[in-house]
Image: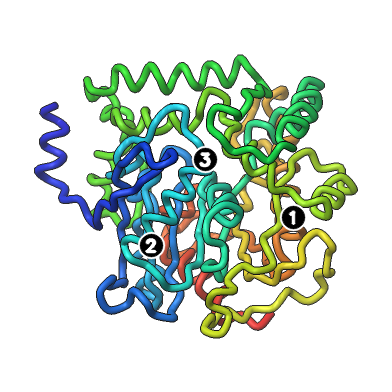
């Protein structure tokens, strides 16, 4: 309690809390919306796109603060939304329904208010939430999507990469259970792909939620080398691995970690499914809708075209601008460069690396006909190291420039 009180004394909450009605109108709670370079009084009904950032699993909005500021410094407003229980948002509820979450995000943007066209920027699981937003919220206001190190479901992909036979059985079961199109929270079946791993993860989140008020998490909060902006690192640490952090992860994980992916499966069209079957790919996701951004077609300044040499595929007829950015390090199968010495661990990593890369290619070929795939590779002055999976918070200005350049200025 003393640590929490001291955090509130030192760190003022940025942004605002927006009241949200959810769960069929039965529940109210506040979602935290934090904008940089955007004035809801003078810009609420403007034509300039607003970048809306959604964080990775367990990450508070402070983890993307540097990226939001970098985008704003490039002349484009940016806002971060904390999902239920994250950052300064109030906790959600159990059993959490992913459909309600994306509709709540849409409510928060509208009530803030942000009535401009938006560009969704999803990091990790935030990219999957962005995909679900496009299916179950107001996709007509979305004029562009950016995915940063995103995978539809990393646990499923990893178990498949290791060639575990139960994975195929569970995938078939999941698809058959997801064909009804229902999104009611109590109707989402629990399908395990590695039950022991998932149960252990869920138990860990629950146990840490119980002991985290003792503030033991602070001793584990020092591994943020290169975090930008440095003057916000203390605020970020105060929101990381605390009681609400573990509760948010516990609720969002939902016992299996597959709820978000299960809901996304209900929107997969036959053309997308057919192409992924042809590619022998285990995971499924919907292509973006044809009417994406239609509410702002005449005012959108995002005019980037599909890259030369990329064929027009039948999986998607959408021309929504999509930028996919991933760290090249996770695709490097050289175990020595990854610091892996055990031969069994090396074999696992090499399997993962190939599937990680293939997933990004499959995204590029299915989400939109107007998709670009960029690899984050070499060192930049901002972090002075080879690009790693922490590039979202170690080189946010470089990343902001790459996103804005691709979305607004690239002719290829």
Q: CA distance from mark 2 to mark 1?
A: 33 Å
SS assignment at label 1: helix
Vertical placement of residue 204 versus 92, above or below:
above
Residue 345 falls in image quadrant: top right
**Which one is in front in this view, the residue at disc 3 or the one at disc 1?**
3
Compare residues 333 and 192 and report the one nearer the observer: 192
Determine which residue is flagged by label 1.
361
Q: Position of residue 182 (x, y in %)?
A: 64, 38
Determine which residue is flagged by label 3.
98
Q: Quadrant of the C terminus?
A: bottom right
SS assignment at label 3: helix
Which sits earlier in the primary sequence, circle 3 or circle 1?
3
Query: Residue at left 48%, top 64%?
Result: 399
Determine which residue is flagged by label 2.
110
Q: Position of residue 329 (x, y in %)?
A: 61, 48
Q: Position of residue 47 (x, y in %)?
A: 44, 81
Crowdedness near tag 1: few (<14), some (14–19) or many (≥20) residues, C-alpha within 10 Å:
some
**For the view shown, which residue lies furthest in the right direction?**
278
Q: Can residue 235 be seen in the rendering of this structure?
A: yes
Compare residues 370 and 173 and report the one nearer the observer: 173
Disc 3 and disc 2 in contact, CB within 8 angstroms: no
């Amino acid at each position: 309690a003393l640590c929490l009180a001291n955090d509130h004394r030192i760190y003022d909450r940025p942004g605002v809390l927006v009241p949200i009605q959810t769960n069929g109108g039965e529940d109210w709670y506040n979602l935290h919306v934090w904008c940089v370079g955007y004035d809801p009084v003078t810009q609420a009904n403007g034509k300039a796109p607003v970048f809306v950032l959604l964080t990775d699993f367990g990450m508070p909005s402070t983890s993307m603060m540097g990226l939001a500021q970098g985008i704003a410094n490039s002349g484009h407003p940016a806002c971060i939304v904390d999902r239920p229980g994250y950052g300064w948002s109030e906790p959600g509820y159990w059993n959490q329904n992913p459909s309600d979450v994306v509709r709540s995000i849409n409510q928060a943007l509208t009530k803030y208010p942000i009535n401009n066209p938006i560009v969704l920027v999803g990091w990790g699981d935030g990219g999957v939430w962005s995909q679900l937003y496009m299916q179950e919220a107001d996709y007509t206001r979305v004029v562009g999507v950016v995915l940063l190190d995103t995978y539809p479901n990393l646990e499923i992909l990893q178990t498949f990469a290791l060639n575990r036979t139960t994975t195929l059985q569970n995938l078939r079961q999941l698809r058959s259970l997801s064909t009804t199109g229902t999104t009611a929270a109590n109707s989402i079946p629990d399908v395990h792909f590695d039950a022991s791993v998932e149960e252990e993860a869920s138990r860990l989140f629950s146990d840490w939620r119980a002991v985290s008020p003792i503030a033991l998490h602070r001793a584990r909060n020092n591994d943020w080398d290169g975090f930008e902006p440095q003057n916000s690192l203390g605020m970020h640490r105060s929101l990381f691995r605390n009681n609400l952090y573990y509760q948010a992860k516990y609720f969002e994980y939902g016992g299996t970690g597959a709820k978000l992916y299960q809901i996304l499966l209900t929107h997969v069209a036959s053309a997308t499914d057919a192409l992924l079957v042809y590619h022998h790919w285990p995971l499924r996701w919907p292509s973006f809708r044809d009417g994406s951004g239609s509410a702002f077609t005449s005012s959108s300044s995002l005019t980037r075209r599909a890259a030369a040499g990329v064929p027009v595929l039948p999986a998607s007829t959408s021309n929504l601008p999509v930028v996919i950015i991933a760290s090249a390090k996770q695709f490097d199968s050289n175990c020595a460069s990854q610091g892996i010495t055990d031969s069994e661990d090396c074999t696992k990593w090499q399997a993962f690396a190939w599937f990680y890369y293939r997933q990004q290619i499959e995204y590029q070929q299915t989400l939109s006909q107007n998709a670009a795939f960029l690899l984050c590779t070499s060192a930049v002055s901002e972090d002075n190291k080879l690009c790693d999976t922490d590039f979202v918070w170690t080189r946010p200005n470089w990343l902001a420039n790459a996103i804005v350049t691709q979305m607004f200025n690239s002719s290829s």
